[in-house]
Structures are given as structure tokens and as C-alpha cells.
């Protein structure tokens, strides 16, 4: 029996400073991109595929870029080539997708054509946006681009069409059959706040986005581990095994259906109002992740094990979603509040005068700083001990239920 793919990937990418949770999610996104529309699970009259939108968010130095580049490098070694450009306009992105060379069709597309008896069924346009600096990916009009990506996340039906304006009304229409987009991006709370207005978090694209937060491991590794060619070859073999094991529908066991129903009906909406729209898509995220986990173990049916692990991953991610965006959008002083939290988390206790020396350029007067501190303390964001200020640590809310399996996560992931 093979070792669990995700544990094998964590072992393969270990030996540096990158948080295990970032590496796990990068592996999940990698399989999602690798499988594309090759497998699906039925959901009513629709099909759900493995494509995912994942954003790793952490302060500078959390090694988000390393996690993303490791996954991208391994996927490339395994023959995946449908990466998006590192920086591109929405129009060029859609044009490239619509004009994707049919000769690059994957083995899965060819077999799909044989399976369904028509070439049209295999006419798929897919791409993976691997952007360790996600905001830099957008050449222009980031909000309009994100809106389009939101539309393409679960596209089914007739080809997607985008008409551009031209001189004297002579526009150009780009037609994209079966658009399949995957995202693995990186961001910092500060960079995110600079790029997006607060109200964007509650809109379409961000309800489809799985926001993953981690803090620096605190480990200092001067010389990261060099991965051997033999170990890379083994991981490539595992990926190709996953890629070629199945085409078409993946079933779901009756026990798994019962468990999904239980999770859906008992899940509690996140307290953070910024994630209100996310709750409406949580079931879809759960099924997509269950499909990814089934693929990772070469399963042709989603089992309760796949559902439990997908739900464990989602629940643990949700526990830290509020920290991912920091104080973004919380109030008029959200930027100042975020700066205060950053300073507090970087010190083992700090006095108010010392804190002021770090953030005085963010306030127009001392009275506003004092009022901000008072408000944060009243809201339970900071606490005092003696004359020093400390951030209130996020406590992971354990679910004492058969819907999660905490032991599946590593000690670093669960105990962070």
C-alpha cells in the first residue's frame, strides 16, 4: 500500500521553513489542477470537478512563494504545462484560453472523447494560475478580472463567450468551451487590503476562494534540504498514477452521502460577517475536496474517509480565515488595527509607549491611537498583563464528532 499522498508530499517538501499547512494545500491544489475535468461527482443536474481557487495568506516571510513554487515545479516535472502567464490582462487571458492549441489536449481529454463518442465532449480549455504574488498577476482592472474568474469557477453548459469592443464597433468574440480554471495564489493581508475594497470579500469570487492562513514556523534553516532526483521521480510517478487511474464519474457511497448531509445540516456559519457568502458555497467546497482526496488514493468512489478528511481540512482552515485578512474591512481604522496586531505578534509583550513608536506614522494624533487600543481591548483582540500588551491568541474550536479527524493533520498543522 502506498503512503498517503499528502503525507508523502509533506515528507518530500520538508526540510525548510515553509509551514506544513501551506504545503498541504499546495498539494491539494496541484491535484485539483492536474485532474481538471477528467473526473467529476454528480451534484443534482450538475457535475462538480476538482478545480479549486486557493489563496495562501500570511505576513511577509511566511514562505508562501516557496510552497507555491514547489507544487508548480513538481507538476511541471510530471508533464503539466497549462500554466497561465505570470502577469496578464483579462482580455489576453480569455483569448489565450479560447485559442488554446487543441494539439495540447491531455490523455484524459482523448479518452473522454472515446468514452462519450464525440470530440466535442473532450473540447476543454484549462489553465492553472500559479501566482505567488497574486495581486501582480493582474495586468489591469483587477476587480473586473476577479468577477470573470468567479463566473468561470463552476462553468457548465454552452461555451463561455467574451466580446471585446473594437474600432468602429467591430468587436471580437472569444469562445471558450468548458473553461476550467485553477488558482494557487499567495498574498499578505496588507497587500490584499491595498488591492481590494472591503466590500469585495462578500462577493462572488471570494465566496469561491479558499483562504488559507498560516504563521511563520519560527524555524531557521540556513541551508534547506536538497531533494534528490530519486525522490522527485517517485513523486512524479505518484502524480501520473493519480492522473491516469480513472476518467469520468466518481461515485459516492451511501454512508458518505449520509455524512455529507450531516455536515451540511450541522455546520455553523462563521462568526466573521466577511465570510457570510462563503457559507453558501461550503457544501460545494466540501464535495470538491472530497473528490480530490478520493483521487489522491485512486478511489473510484468517495467514501466517508474522503469526506472526513476534506471536512477536517476545511474546518481547520475556517478556524483561521479571520486572521487571514486581519482587520481588513472591519472598520474605518482597520489598517491601523492590522498594523497594531502585526507589531504585537512580533513581540513577546510590549508597552503602549513602545507600541506607539512603531505605529505613530499610521495615526494623525495620539488620542486616536489610545481610542483604537481601547476599542481593540474591548473587542477581545488584545489583552494586558502588567504594563504590557499582548495579542489574544486564536483558540482552535475542536469538533467532538465523527465528522473530523484531527490526527490526520501533522502536529505542526494542528498545534500551530
Image (cartoon, grey):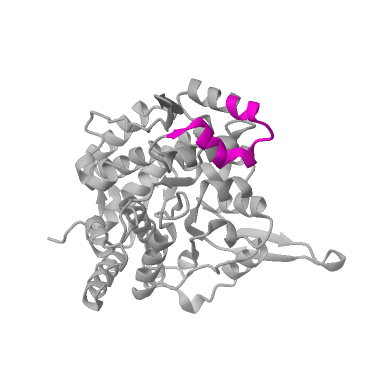
Q: Main secondary structure of the magenta part?
A: helix
Q: Residue furthest left?
A: 1
Give the residues drawn in magenta, as a range. Answer: 350-370
Compared with residue 17, is residue 45 higher up or lower down, i.e. above or below? Answer: above
Q: Residue furthest right?
A: 168
Q: Position of residue 175 (x, y in %)?
A: 62, 64
Tell me which corner region of the image, top left, top right, bottom left or bottom right, holds residue 139.
bottom right
Compared with residue 32, is residue 366 higher up or lower down, i.e. above or below? Answer: above
Picture quarter with the C terminus: top left
Please indicate, yes or no, whether residue 409 appears anywhere in the rendered image: no
Q: Position of residue 335 (x, y in %)?
A: 59, 39
Please indicate, yes or no, whether residue 283 appears anywhere in the rendered image: yes
Q: Nearer the viewer, residue 89 or 14?
A: 14
- Residue at 44% x, 53% y: name it: 52
Picture quarter with the N terminus: bottom left
Is 196 positioned to the left or the right of 51 in the image?
right
Q: Position of residue 78 (x, y in %)?
A: 34, 73
Report if residue 360 lies within the magenta region: yes
Amino acid at each position: 500500500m502506498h503512503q498517503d499522498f499528502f503525507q508523502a508530499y509533506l515528507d518530500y517538501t520538508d526540510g525548510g521553513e515553509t509551514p506544513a499547512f501551506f504545503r498541504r494545500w499546495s498539494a491539494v491544489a496541484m491535484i485539483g489542477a492536474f485532474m481538471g475535468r477528467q473526473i467529476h461527482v454528480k451534484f443534482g443536474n450538475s457535475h462538480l470537478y476538482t478545480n479549486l481557487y486557493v489563496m495562501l495568506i500570511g505576513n511577509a516571510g511566511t514562505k508562501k512563494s516557496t510552497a507555491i513554487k514547489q507544487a508548480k515545479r513538481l507538476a511541471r516535472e510530471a508533464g503539466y504545462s497549462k500554466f497561465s502567464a505570470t502577469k496578464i490582462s483579462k482580455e489576453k487571458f480569455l483569448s489565450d484560453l479560447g485559442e488554446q492549441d487543441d494539439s495540447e489536449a491531455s490523455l484524459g481529454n482523448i479518452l473522454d472523447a472515446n468514452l462519450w463518442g464525440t470530440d466535442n465532449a473532450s473540447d476543454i480549455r484549462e489553465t492553472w494560475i500559479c501566482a505567488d504574488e497574486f495581486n501582480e498577476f493582474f495586468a489591469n482592472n483587477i476587480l473586473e478580472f476577479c468577477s470573470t474568474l468567479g463566473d468561470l469557477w463552476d462553468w457548465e453548459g454552452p461555451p463561455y463567450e467574451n466580446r471585446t469592443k473594437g474600432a468602429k464597433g467591430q468587436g471580437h468574440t472569444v469562445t471558450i468551451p468548458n473553461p476550467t480554471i485553477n488558482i494557487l495564489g499567495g498574498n499578505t493581508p496588507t497587500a490584499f487590503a491595498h488591492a481590494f475594497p472591503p466590500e469585495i470579500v462578500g462577493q462572488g469570487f471570494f465566496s469561491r476562494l479558499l483562504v488559507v492562513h498560516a504563521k511563520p514556523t519560527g524555524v531557521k534553516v540556513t541551508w534547506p534540504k536538497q531533494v534528490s532526483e530519486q525522490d522527485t521521480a517517485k513523486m512524479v510517478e505518484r502524480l501520473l498514477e493519480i492522473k491516469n487511474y480513472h476518467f469520468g464519474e466518481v461515485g459516492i457511497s451511501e454512508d458518505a452521502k449520509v455524512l455529507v448531509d450531516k455536515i451540511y445540516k450541522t455546520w455553523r456559519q462563521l462568526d466573521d460577517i466577511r465570510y457570510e457568502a462563503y457559507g453558501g458555497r461550503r457544501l460545494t467546497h466540501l464535495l470538491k475536496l472530497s473528490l480530490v482526496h478520493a483521487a489522491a488514493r485512486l478511489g473510484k468512489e468517495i467514501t466517508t474517509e474522503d469526506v472526513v478528511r476534506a471536512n477536517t481540512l476545511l474546518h481547520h482552515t475556517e478556524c483561521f480565515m479571520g486572521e487571514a485578512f486581519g482587520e481588513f474591512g472591519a472598520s474605518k481604522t482597520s489598517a491601523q488595527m492590522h498594523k497594531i496586531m502585526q507589531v504585537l505578534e512580533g513581540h513577546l509583550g510590549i508597552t503602549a509607549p513602545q507600541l506607539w513608536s512603531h505605529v505613530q506614522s499610521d495615526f494623525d494624533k495620539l488620542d486616536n491611537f489610545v481610542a483604537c487600543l481601547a476599542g481593540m481591548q474591548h473587542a477581545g483582540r488584545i489583552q494586558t498583563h502588567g504594563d504590557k500588551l499582548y495579542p489574544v491568541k486564536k483558540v482552535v474550536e475542536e469538533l467532538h464528532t465523527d465528522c473530523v479527524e484531527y490526527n490526520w493533520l501533522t502536529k505542526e498543522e494542528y498545534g500551530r
